[in-house]
Image: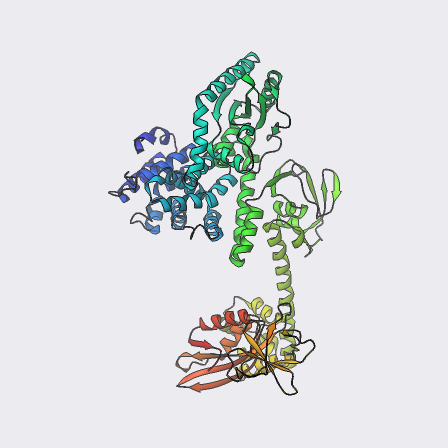
Amino acid sequence: MKDSITFASLEDRLKKRESYEEIKKAYEYALKEHEGMKRLSGDDFITHPLEVTNILLDLNVDDTTLIAALLHEVINNGNTTYEELADKFGDEVAKIVASVSKINKLELPDNNESSIIYLRKILVGLAEDVRVLYIKLADRLHNMRTNWAINPSKQKEKANETMTVLVPIAHRLGINSIKSELENLSLYYLKPDVYNDILEKLNNTVAELNDYLEEMKESIIEILTDAGITFEIKGRVKSVYSIYNKLSNGKKWDNIYDILALRVFVNTESECYQVIGLIHSRFRPMPKRFKDYIASPKENMYQSLHTTVFGVEGKVFEVQVRTYEMDEIAEKGVASHWSYKEKGKKIQNIMEQKLEMFRNVIESSTTESDVDFENAVNTNIFSESIYTYTPKGDVIELPVGSTPIDFAYRIHSKVGDTTVGAIVNDQIVPLSYELQNDDVVNIKTNSNAKPNKDWINIAKTNQAKNKIKAYFSKKDKEEYIAKGKDILEKELRKRKLAINETLNSSNIEKLLKDLKVKDMDDIYFGIGSLRYTAGYIINLTQNDKHQVDDLLFERKREMPKINYKSDILVEGTGNIMVNIAKCCMPVKGDAIVGYITKGQGISIHKKNCSNVPQDSDRIIEVEWNNNSSNYYYTNIYVTTKDNKDILAEVITEIGKKDSLVRSCKTLEKDANLIYELNIRIKDKDELEKIKNAIFKMNNVVKVSDNL
C-alpha cells in the first residue's frame, strides 16, 4: 500500500502557483475542519481532498479549482457554512464548493432506475461553473481507488453510478486519463470475473508482449533518429476495459489488433505525418486501419494519427502519432493549460460550445418530462458529434444529424432568426440538409427575414429549437399585448370613461398590486389571451362591488355548447347521443360508466356516482376517446379561512391556468365561506393543477370536488 499523501509531498508543485499562499490557507482550514476524522480506508480524512487536488494538478486546472478542491468536503463533512466560506475565500470558491457539496449528496436510487434525474442535477451543477465537474470527477476517481473499503453492495452501486453518469461526462469533456481509470475500476467491481479473466490472459503473456514492445520501440527509434526527428516514444499493453469493450462488441481475442500499442510524440503537426510515412516505409500497414484524427478530430477534440502495422516477429502493433499539445488535450481534456495558449484558441472555442450544449439542455429541463430530458441529453450531449466550419475556418461542433438551422443558431440567435438559405461546400442546400463532418457552411441572412415554425421540426439541437420557440413566444406575446390594449381601450370608450383618468398612476399601481403582475403589458397580455376580461380590469380600478358578477357574466357569454358525442366511446354502439351527467360532472380522465336513459341517449357518470344503481341492467361500458380535445364543465368547492372574501383572487388564479369560470355561488357552512365554482377545463390533470394552485393561496383551507 502506498504512503498517504501529504501537503508537503505536493508543495513543490503548488509553490509554482501564483496563489500558493491562498492554497496553503485553504489546506490549513480544511485540516482544521477535518481534524480527528477518518475515512473507511483508515486514512485521515484530509488525505481525500489532498488526493483530489493531486489528480487536478495533473490536469493543470486553475488555482481557484485547487482551492475549492481542498475545501470541497468542509460543508458536508465539517462545520462550515456557505457564508463563512465566502467570507474567508470569496464567493467564487464558495459557490463551487456548495455545488460540489450538493452533488455529493446525490445517489442513484437503485440500479434499475433511470439515471436521468441524477444526471439532471449533475448538469445543473455544471451550468454554473464547469470546475464543479472537474472536482466531482477527481473526487469520484479517488473514491473508486479506495472503493474496496465499503461493503460489496455499495461497491457495485458506486461503480454503476460511475459508469452510467460520470464516465460519459469525462468522455464528453475529453478527460481521457480520468475516464480510462474510472472505466477499469468500475469494471473490476461490476464484473470481477470478466475483469480477472482478461487480466489473467494478459498477465500470462505480459512478459512476452513487453519484449515485443521493446523490440518494436528500438526499431522505430532507429528510423526516426536517422531521419533527424526530435521525438519521444512510449509503449503500453491495452487496458482491461478497452479489451472488454472490444470483446463485448463481438471481437475475438485473436482479432484485437491493438493490444500492443506505441505512442510517438513530436513537436509539430507536419512531423506527425512524416513519422507515419517513415513507419509505413519499414513496416507494412494493415489495410483500412489508418485513421486521421488530426484533420477530423473526434467529438471530444481528440487529435492523433492512428495506424496498425505488422511489426517485429509479424506481430500486430497499433501506432499513434501526435504532438505534445494534442496529447495534453487527449489525456487531460480542454481543462489543460494548452487550451488557453495562442495555438489553442480553436480548442477553447470548442470547449465553450460544449458547455453551451449542456446549458441549453438544462434550460429546458425544468419543463420537460424525464423521458424528454433523456432524449435531449442523448441527442445533444452524449451523441456522436460532427465538426463543421464557418467560411473563416472557425470550428462549430454539432450533434450528428444537425442542419444548417442548428449551425446558424449555434453562431448567434440573430443569425438564426434571419436565415434565408445555406451554402455548404460551395453548393446551395435546403435548410433541412443533414450536415456532415468537415462541411464548410455559409449561412445567408436577410435583416427582414423571420423564422419559420416548421424549423422546430427540422432542427436537431435543443439550442435551436428553444430559440425558435422563444422567438414565436415573444411574437405571440406582443400580439396579445396589442390585442389586449385595444380591447381595454374599446371597453373604456364604450363605457364613456376617459382612458387617462381610468388608467392613472394610482389605479395602475392598484391593478399591479391586486393582480400581482409586473407592469401594464402583463395586464394587456392577460386581456388579449382571455385570462382577464376588460370589464373585470375596469371594475378593479373603480372598486365596483359587481366586478366578479360582471366577470362571470362576460365569460358566461363566451361559453359554447359542447357536443360530447366524439368524446365518449360506447361499447358496441356507433352513432348515439351522449351527455355528461350534471349530478357528478365527470371530466376526461375520470373513471366513468354509461347509463341508458329513456329518450336522452347515454348519460355519462363517474363510476362512484350515488345516482347510478350499481346492479342496473341499464349500465353500459364506456370510455374516453383519447384523440378528442373538447372542454368539460365541472364544479369545485373552495373553503376560505375566517370567512375571507377572496372570490376575485380565486377567479384570477383560475384564469392564469387558462381555464374559465362559468358560474359561481357563495355558500356559508359551519361559519365558513365556501365558493361553488363551475369551471371549464380540458381533463382531470388540468383540474388537479387548478385545485393545487388555489389550495396554495393565502386564506384557502380546502379545495374539493364536493361539499
- Horizontal side of 617 relative to 127 (left or right) equals right
Of 359 and 689, which appears nearest the observer? 689
Of 19 and 689, which appears nearest the observer? 689
User: Considering only vertical position in the picture, is 150 above or below 621?
Assistant: above
At x 50%, y 18%, the residue is: 217
Percent x, y for residue 123? 48, 48
- The colour scheme is rainbow
Percent x, y for residue 302? 55, 33
User: Considering only vertical position in the picture, is 289 above or below 599?
Assistant: above
Asked if one can make out residue 323 in the rendered structure from this viewpoint, the answer is yes
Asked if one can make out residue 360 in the rendered structure from this viewpoint, the answer is no
Quadrant of the image containing the N terminus:
top left
Q: Residue furthest toward the left?
A: 36
At x 28%, y 40%, the residue is: 31
Q: For residue 634, which quarter of the picture?
A: bottom right
Q: For residue 184, which quarter of the picture?
A: top left
- Horizontal side of 187 relative to 44 (left or right) equals right
* Total marks placed: 0
